[in-house]
Structure formats: structure tokens, C-alpha cells
Amino acid sequence: MFKKKFLLHTILILTAIGMLFPFIVMILLSLSKENNLSFSNFMITGANYCNVFKSIPITRYFINSLVVSVFTTIFQVLFSTLAGYAFARMNFKGRDIIFFTFLITMFIPPQVNIVPLFFLMRELHLVDTYQALILPGIFGGFGVFMMRQYFLGFSKELEDAAIIDGCNRIQMFFKIAMPLAVPAIATLAIFTFITSWNSFIWPLIVTNSESMRTLPLGLAIFKGSYREITMWGDLFACSVVCAVPTILIFLLEKKYIINDILKGAVKE
């Protein structure tokens, strides 16, 4: 038994090291004084980060990405939670057909929707605005499906007890369902935030001005700027700036993911 646990832990540790190694190397090279991909004559310096902030308006790109990702995550979680609860705990005409329609959207590649979405945003005069960056991401079949499956596991006895105590449907959702669904909500929020933060194709198509560009676009612009020699230290520094927020979001929300679904609920 001890040998199996030791072997399992060893495999997990080696896997973690293998996954973290590229990121650690990226951080070290972003602090390297020399413009090379080796650690010979390695000297720590913050000049690379200064060069990035001087070369491109990365602060503006960061704010744009933050605004888009935060609002997309908030609305995606809100709408998905409401729809998931309705599909799981309420009976209404056409429920299964509507839910099946949501599932179909999960099988459509996102690239197929880019051209129709762009024409729609153009007709609504929303091109090169925050609305164009946020609106397409606040609805998603995956979020609705995930929250529905989570709410299906709720205890019927818990709902009956809430009804006896005088809760209506809205009170039951906000006071009982949502607090118990924190692990699923946190998971959906992480997935949505990371997806929105790393989005590249849609912001590239729907934005025209530099003031509306996001961080992934800024990284591509910085990499493809008019340079005869690639400044690897500066490029890695820009990459670190792009990657750190998603890591922080995961670290802040990971404790909610591992919470038990019935933590704080009544015992049967």
C-alpha cells in the first residue's frame, strides 16, 4: 500500500514539475539581462518589463481585457445559473426542446459564428466597443448544461423544507440554490474568465482602434512589431503580464471548487 501511494505521489509531483517548468523558465527569461534563450551569464533585471510598458500601451490593453473578462464572467454565470436552475427544477411547456436547442449550440464551432456576429454588431453600430467584445460571450450552452446537471443533484427534501418555511421560487434560488452551487459557479467563472481573457480572433475582428485592443492582441502586436531582432526578454515579460491574472483567478477561487455540494445544508 505504501509503495503504491509513493509511486502515485511521485508521478503526480513529476507531472506538476513538468507542467510548471515552462512557466518558470518564462519568468526567469523575462528577468534575464541578456537577449538569449540560455542561462549563461544570467543576471536579473526588470528592464524587460519597463521596455514592454514603454513600447506598447499595455496598461490600456490590460484594462480592456479586465473589463471584458469580468463583465463576461458575471453575466455568463448569472444567466447560466438562472437557466440551469429553471431547466433542472421547474416544469414548463417546451422545457426539453429548449434545453436540447441549447445543447445543439455546443456542437457548432465558434469560428462558424464569427462572420454573422460581426455583421450583427455592425448593424447595431457596436463595432469597436466594449459591448461588441462582451455580448457574444455572456450566453453559452456549456454553462447552462453544467449548471443544470449540478442543480439536478439537489435534495428534494431541502426544497420541500424551504417551501414549508415560506420560501417562494425566487427566494429559494437566491437563498438556497446559489449558496449551495458555489463550487459549480466558481468552476464556471474560472472557465469563462480564462476563455474570455485568452480570446484572440473575435477581438481582432471586432476592434479597430488601439484603445479597444485586449492583451492577447497586444502580445501579438508586440511580437510582430518592427524589430529586426526578436527581444526575447521583452517578449517573455509581456507573456508573463498576460498570464499572471488567470493564475491569480484560479488561486483565489480554487477553494470554492473543492467545497462539498451540501456544505452548510441541513442533515436528513
Image: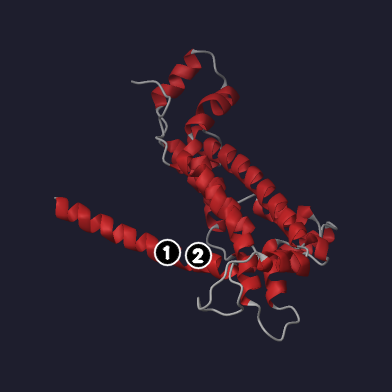
Looking at the picture, does residue 67 appear above or below residue 216? above
| Residue 14 placement (x, y as % from top left) | 33, 63
Q: Secondary structure at mark 1?
A: helix
The number of numbered badges drawn on the structure is 2
In this image, 41 relative to 2: left or right? right
Residue bearing mark 2: 23
Q: Are marks 2 and 1 in contact (CB under 8 Å)?
A: yes
Residue at point 65%, 81% (across, down): 230
Indicate the position of residue 169 as horizontal and vertical percent values: 57, 24
Q: Pick the quarter of the image with the C terminus.
A: top left
Q: Residues within 10 Å of mark 1 (few under 14, many from 20)?
A: few
- Image position of 152 (left or right of 253): left
Q: Amino acid at mark 2?
A: Phe
Q: What's the residue at 74%, 55% (across, down)?
A: 64
Q: Residue furthest top?
A: 165
Q: Nearer the viewer, residue 197 or 136?
A: 197
The answer to whether 252 is drawn above or below residue 19 in the figure is above
Q: What residue did someone put label 1 on? A: 19
Q: Give the side of residue 132 with respect to residue 245, left or right.
A: right
Residue type, label 1: Met
Q: Secondary structure at mark 2?
A: helix
What residue is shown at x 54% (from left), y 58% (from top)?
Answer: 106
Q: Residue furthest right?
A: 125
